[in-house]
């Protein structure tokens, strides 16, 4: 169990705890903070704090590394938005627990690649919970509109993006309030980038699973290699098999859902002693 | 000390980056970002109005100075300078 489970899980996985879907947890702000844009929501406050730290790398590299270390030591204090990788089956469970579920445009892709998503076939992000009822107030944030979905439609929709090769991650909106499921890839996704390029951990934690290749079943077709977003999966030429570095693996399950022979299993992170503290 | 490539964006020339998006989509390192200057309630910002969106290069530490963006820019608004080694 990760530290978010310790704090918000009540003995189970934090994102399967119904408490974390309660309206009362929506937009829990830290007191005394100055308002930013979009009504000073926890998302933009966290983004502003990260931005201030990241800007430091241009002027003082050592200070920047110190600040990243300091930010990582403050995990769980509510200063930063919590995100975590989710395998497909868990993402579907989250969608089943939320109401409403809405497809919307991805703000990271809009910012980094200027990709405009204007209809329900293009939307690649999911908004969950009461916040989505207010989308019309901020049409710039929900550019191109939103599309409210039933659980079945949302499940189909998650599977569609999974097949295309986007990995799911859960996003919070103040504390552990479950506010959305992103479908991410590198380098579009801000959270993945913050983790891989700059070392911020809280915005993008590893999932409760880790992928393992079964060498008996793998025939070395290489389909999984192009699906890994984290550089954890390589093709081992001499063995003619896929190879996963389990320390680097984020447990998103993209390689597992892509494998045509079922040669990759997602095993529980807690069942691997050396990976229990690797989040 | 700033050891990374400096990307100068002439915002008097680059006025509608969210509509043009050429440099944003060609960069192999995804160095650029675009954002709305002002976000208003109940209003979707018009990407064709000059000055509504601005271009920035927040990830310039990842820039390899391949100059693809300069080549593709229709208004010649970009300039990259590499700091000289000390």
Image (cartoon, rainbow, N blue to C red):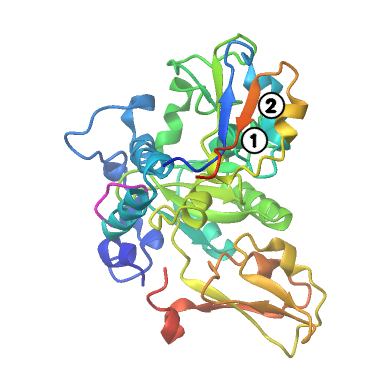
- Residue A227, position as x, y percentages in the image: 70, 62
Viewer-proximal residue among A120 and A66: A66
In this rendered view, identify the residue nearer to me: B67 or A50: B67
Label 1: few (<14), some (14–19) or many (≥20) C-alpha neighbours in 10 Å: many
Q: Secondary structure at mark 2?
A: loop
Decide which of A114, B82 is in the foreground and name it. Answer: B82
- In the rendered image, the residue lying farthest to the front is B86
* Chain to which mark 2 belongs: B
Q: Which residue is mark 2?
A: B21
As drawn, the label of residue A113 is: 1
Residue at the image point whose x is 52% and y is 53% from the top: A192
CB under 8 Å between discs 1 and 2: yes
A243 lies above or below A66: below
Residue A28 in the image: state x and y as whole percent.
26, 41
Query: Looking at the image, which is closer to me, A103 or A234?
Result: A234
For residue A208, above or below residue A212: above
Q: Which secondary structure type mostly characterizes the magenta part of the structure?
A: loop
In the rendered structure, the answer to whether residue B46 lies left or right of residue A205 reads right
Query: Chain ID for label 1?
Result: A
């Amino acid at each position: 169990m990760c530290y978010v489970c310790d704090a918000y899980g009540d003995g189970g996985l934090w994102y399967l705890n119904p408490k974390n879907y309660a309206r009362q947890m929506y937009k829990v702000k830290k007191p005394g903070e100055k308002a930013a844009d979009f009504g000073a929501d926890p998302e933009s406050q966290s983004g502003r704090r990260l931005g201030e730290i990241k800007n430091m790398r241009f002027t003082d590299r050592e200070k920047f590394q110190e600040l990243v270390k300091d930010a990582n030591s403050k995990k769980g204090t509510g200063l930063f938005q919590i995100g975590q990788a989710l395998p497909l089956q868990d993402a579907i469970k989250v969608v089943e627990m939320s109401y409403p579920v809405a497809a919307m445009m991805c703000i990271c892709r809009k910012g980094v690649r200027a990709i405009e998503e204007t209809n329900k076939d293009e939307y690649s992000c999911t908004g969950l919970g009461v916040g989505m009822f207010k989308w019309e107030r901020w049409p710039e944030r929900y550019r191109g509109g939103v599309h409210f979905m039933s659980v079945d439609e949302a499940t189909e929709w998650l599977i569609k993006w999974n097949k295309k090769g986007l990995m799911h991650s859960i996003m919070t909106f103040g504390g552990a309030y479950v506010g959305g499921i992103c479908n991410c890839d590198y380098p579009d996704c801000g959270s993945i980038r913050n983790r891989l390029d700059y070392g911020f951990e809280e915005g993008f934690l590893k999932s409760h699973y880790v992928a393992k290749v079964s060498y008996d079943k793998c025939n070395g077709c290489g389909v999984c290699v192009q699906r890994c977003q984290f550089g954890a999966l390589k093709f081992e030429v001499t063995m003619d098999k896929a190879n996963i570095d389990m320390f680097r693996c984020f447990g998103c399950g993209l390689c597992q859902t892509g494998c045509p022979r079922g040669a990759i299993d997602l095993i529980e992170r807690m069942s691997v002693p050396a990976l229990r503290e690797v989040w | 000390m700033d050891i990374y490539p400096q990307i100068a964006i002439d915002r008097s020339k680059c006025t509608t980056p969210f509509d043009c998006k050429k440099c944003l989509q060609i960069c192999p390192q995804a160095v650029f970002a675009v954002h709305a200057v002002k976000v208003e309630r109940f209003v979707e910002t018009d990407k064709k109005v000059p000055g509504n969106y601005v271009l920035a290069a927040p990830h310039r530490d990842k820039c390899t100075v391949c100059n693809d963006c300069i080549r593709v820019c229709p208004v010649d608004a970009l300039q990259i300078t590499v700091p000289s080694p000390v």
